Amino acid sequence: MRASLGVLGLALGSVSALLGIVVLAWGLRRNDPRFLRLGRRYAFVLLGAAALSVFAMEWALITHDFSIRYVAENNARATPLLFTITGLWAALEGSILLWGLVLGGYLAWMAHRFRNRATDPMVAWAMIVGFVVALFFFALMLGPANPFQTLANPPADGRGPNPLLQNHPLMAFHPPMLYLGYVGMTVPFAFAIAALVTGRLGEGWLAETRRATLVAWGFLTVGIILGAWWSYEVLGWGGYWAWDPVENASLLPWLTATAFIHSVIVQERRGMLRVWNLSLVVATFCLTILGTFITRSGVIDSVHSFTESPIGGWLLGFLAVVTIGSVLLIAWRGDRLRAPGRIDSPVSRESAFLVNNLLFAALAVVVLLGTVYPLLAEALQDRRVSVGEPYFDRMTTPIGIALLFLMAAAPALPWRATSGEVLRRRLLVPAWLGVAVMVVAAVAGIRDLWVLVTFGLAAFAVGGIVRQFALGLRAQRATGTSWWAAPWRTVRGGPRLYGGLVVHLGVVAIAVALAASANLSTKTETRLEVGQSTEVRGYSFTYVRRDVVMTEQKRSVKAQIRIEQGDRDLGTYAPAVSIFPGGMSGIGTPSVRTGILRDIYLTLISAPTDRDRVTIGIAINPMVVWLWIGGALMALGTALALVPKSRRIVGPASPTPRAGSAPPATDTTDAVATMSP
Amino acid sequence: MLAVVVLAVIVWAAQPSGAPTPAERARALAAQLRCPDCESLSAADAQTSSARAIRRDLRARVAEGQSDATIRQAYVERYGEAIVLEPERRGLGLLVWGLPVVMLGAGALGLALAFRRWRRLQRRHATPDDEAIVREARRDGPTL
């Protein structure tokens, strides 16, 4: 019953995607607006069909319908409700179902957003591309990745989700956020292809997809950060990023998308970089497919590749078609893509964006090469090799530092060209702030060069951001706005600028956290008997007692550890090891005392088999909480950038110079450096 | 002035703070080796029993006075080259190390060349005199 309902939804989804393609193509061919108006409506049918399938799966999960193979493999009667619901994305087939639902949502959004322009060939083509992508994923589910496969002899109880996936509530948020980001990149991709096909390669398609891209980028950012958080809270090795192939797979599209949302500004202002921007959009979409391939085909052994399945070939084929098709389209339109624009000075906002793109592209190449190298070595030379943190750290740190410098300096650069005088006025105070922080940190005993440089650049960047906000607020106050209304009105006057700056603030927080936690942490292991204490970096840890907690879901052994600092009792924390029925080895769960300056991270290394002895891992990880705060700031900044610009409010900008019209920046543009026209 | 202070701090910070202690050496070595029963974690980070065994073994080897190269070699011989978390610096591995650097260099060079071209274009802007000549010519001659 539930399986049939689910398959019905999948079939309906496939048919509506197919009908959408056929009807729109027919309408385009005959130039018949009736068909074009009809075609877009299939997006809503598709969304409904996907929702029906997801509903069927959730129903089957909640009612423990083990006649469906997916439910039997990813659910058990003892699984708590939350992890029963999240079972939808605990394995390959369910994840693709969620993918289908999200894609249906974005397509319906496209159809609704452009409802008044349904007869525009650009919109029709974009819808066709969207339907083709949807058709692929629905066909995948009807074929090799069918989530509703039934079992002839249903077991009495299911296997339950992978123990790691039923250990933390973040599981409920990380995968959906990531998918909202991944799948959202289909929208700019669809419009990019539509622009290529229709030959309308101006800036129209960029403007139309700007918000969608930003939304998808924001979700992707949040998804990645939540993944790091989950890893930190669940996996218990004390870190948050292992350069695991699957983590890299989520980072890759983020890198190219980040490059895109910066370089797009150059195209908007100067009409340049058309091929580059199209390539970035196509690359981002391809990398999301590659990410799914890496995650879900089991091609690279990784902690995330819980399943193996024959869909690898399908995804790889689709990837090849998309890549080759896009390259051919770009080559075919080559003559229309040449842009006559130019950039006046290497020291200008435009050129900073170019350098930004160069660095992000380099970062993407590093991550891509490091991720696929083991595959290449195995395929070409039949050797097994590993690439991990030492390679990635060495390659990405210098690029990251360069980007941090750029992020600090570039928002202060005027468009077109600049003079030394302007630079000095805008950057001198933030630069001295950075140097001061560097000196203080060095005096405080930090000798690691990368950490010092990162701290200095972070302060430099914060100085610049605060300066811009202060100038905006002052301009707003000058129009008679009250103190409490001024910040919001300032943002309303230039949402893209101030949203972008808030995102940058989040990046600063993350950079500081990365540098500090990677280089200044302490990690030890200790064996303790009941009542015994140990001291690490001024904290004392006492093993109080052992607790055993039995639930239907698992059996957990906890070691109660009291943490004290001098005479202050900081509370009792309980790292645990849990045994799940059906799981052989114990799953460790760290216990983290989060602090503004440092986390205390406790793990149970050997489960206390007898009552009075335990081996615990103690790590003091500085600044880690700023990763999550930085992520929240990035999300907030993205949301601010999406606020509609108010025309009635005095913006941060008096008239910004358009290409070829205004002289190089003078004093008037100083107070009002803008990120966008 | 700014540059001088930055440079001073960097030079001061970059001064070697004495030879690494045996514990630091063992930790640095562990960070370069993969934990054999994990996927991507290093032997320094992982909490599995094999990773802990490697950490113990590394401490023992360092205490014995073995050089870093000897220790790495011993591990490659025992576990195969997949135990090392870095691509090797020859053959295909050279590509992984070199390609990003080459691309970055090529990109920077491309940008530099583009800016040179753009600057030359700038000089060819029409002066008011040029425009006057064109206006004159247009008024007289036949328009196309």
Image (cartoon, coloured by chain):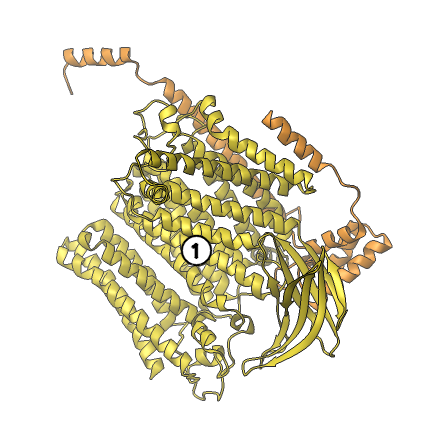
Chain colours: A yellow, B orange
Q: For residue A325, say whether it is visible.
A: no
Residue at position x 36%, y 39% from top?
A: A265
Residue A114 x %, y %: 22, 53
Q: Which residue is mark 1?
A: A220
Tell me the quarter of the image containing the C terminus of chain B.
top left
A332 to the left or right of A86: left
Residue at position x 66%, y 53% from top?
A: A521
A67 to the left or right of A458: left
Figure disc tally = 1
Tell me the quarter of the image containing the N terminus of chain B.
top right
Residue A403 x %, y %: 52, 40
Residue A165 x %, y %: 52, 71
A50 to the left or right of B101: left
Q: Residue furthest right?
A: B64
Residue nearest the observer in this picture, A113 or A484:
A484
Residue at position x 23%, y 11% from top?
A: B132
Name the residue type under label 1.
Leu
Determine the chain carrying the residue at label 1. A
Residue A610 x %, y %: 74, 79
Residue nearest the observer in this picture, A157 or A273:
A157
Instruction: Give the class, few, some or many, for how many residues have Cα within 10 Å of label 1's Cα (few <14, many ≥20).
Output: many
Residue at position x 54%, y 39% from top?
A: A459
* Local secondary structure at mark 1: helix
Q: For residue B116, say whether it is visible.
A: yes
